[in-house]
Each structure stands twice: as structure tokens, then as C-alpha cells.
Image: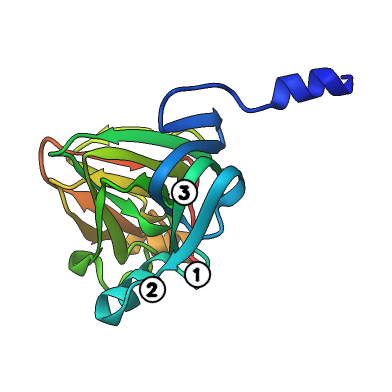
Amino acid sequence: MDLDKFLETHGPKEGGDTFERESSKMLDVSLDGSVMAKAGAMVGYTGDISFERKSGGGLTGMLKKKATGEGTVMMQATGTGHLYLADQGKEVQILELDADDEISVNGNDVLAFEESVTWDIKMMNSIAGTSTGGLFNVYLNGPGNVAITTHGEPLVLPTPVSTDPNATVAWSSNVSPSTKRDLNIKSFLGRSSGETFQLHFAGEGGFVVVQPYEERSPQE
């Protein structure tokens, strides 16, 4: 491929939405104001954009830092231009939340969200003590766009359902998980796994997003 063709093929695509997928693995944010993004996810930008690390203060700040991990503290990007975000080659999924929509997302899988989206970190008391990597989740309430990342194409399952904690990315806020433990499978496999510990969503009318990959925390 000659240089001119390469530049034309791989240059930025024109679009009118605030959040657009530049490719399946890269988010293009048309920024005019502020947006929250995963720290370290910026791969490039045009225009005049500044970045500020946002870990908060007091107990809430400590929880937010612990929830998202050392490399995934949120940052605020402010200015005008195009901001390009990606996270370790994972697939980007854009969700448009209405004012009454709320989802819970694994802290490691949040890529970015608009300033209009309110967010909070909640401890999942029902699964405390398990090695799920999902003890803390980010709750996002619309209206606004949210970008999350998945390893491969996600599958959205209706509840009730049981899932592998390490493959669970997000769920609707109208359902809450508890843990199930299968000691027989553990003895069969000889180690802890998603088949040993499961997240069980018993409520009706919700959904759970899973990915075809077991994403383990650094401590596992």
C-alpha cells in the first residue's frame, strides 16, 4: 500500500456523534467540554485538551481508587477537539443511557462516559470475600453516552442467570448478584475457577453482559 493510500485508509473518520467508534477497538470522543475516561486510555488527541486525575478525597476517593485499580483511576479530559481512547486492544461498546437508565460495570471495563452521566462506586456486599475481581463496581446513571470495553464480542443474557465472575462485565441495576459455590467442581478441577464461584442473578427482567474471556485481577 502506497503512503497516500495508507493515510487515506487509516485517517480519522468523519462523524457527528459525541461518542463514535473510530474502529472496533478505539473510541473517538468529539469533545467540547468535559468527559470522564479511564486513566492511561488516551492514545492521541487533536485540539486543546487537558487531563486531570480524579481519585476523589476521603473515603469515597479511597474506594474509587481501590475499585478501579492502580492503573485504572479515572481522569477528566476537558477542552475541545477529538480524544482517542483505547484499552489493551479490547473491543469498545457504546451504550446510550436515558435519564432512567442505570447500569453497573466492572471498574476495569469502564472506558469513558459523558459529563452528564452520574457515577458512584458501590461495594458489592453480597459477594464480599470472593475472589471475583468485582467487589467494587461502577454504577452509571444517564442520561448520556457510556463506553465500556470487552474482550471479544459480548453476549447479553436475560435474568435469572448464573455467570462466571471473571467473564462478567456489567448488569442492569434492577438486579443484584449473590454468589454460588460448587465444591464438587472445585475438587474436580483442582483449583478455583468461574465454575467454582458463580454470580447468580435471581431477579426477573434484568440483563447481564458477559464476554468470551476470563479477565482475572492481578492478585489472582
Image-based side of 48 in relation to 203, left or right: right
Image-based side of 39 in relation to 176, left or right: right
Q: Residue furthest bottom?
A: 58
> x, y percentage for residue 208?
27, 41
> x, y percentage for residue 83?
53, 43
Label ID, residue 79: 3
Alpha carbons under labels 3 and 1: distance apart:
39 Å
Above-or-below relation of 205 to 167: above
Most foreground residue, 138 or 39: 39
- Local secondary structure at mark 1: loop
Of pointers 3 and 1, the one earlier in the residue sequence: 3
Which residue was labeled with disc 1?
220
Residue type for callout 3: Gly
Residue type for callout 2: Lys
Label 1: how many residues lie within 10 Å, few (<14), some (14-19) or many (20+)? few
- Local secondary structure at mark 3: strand
Label ID, residue 50: none
Which residue was labeled with disc 2?
66
Of pointers 1 and 2, the one earlier in the residue sequence: 2
At 38% across and 68% down in the image, what residue appears? 131
Alpha carbons under labels 2 and 3: distance apart:
28 Å
Most foreground residue, 193 or 186: 193
- Local secondary structure at mark 2: helix
At 50% across and 30% down in the image, what residue appears? 21
At 38% across and 73% down in the image, what residue appears? 66
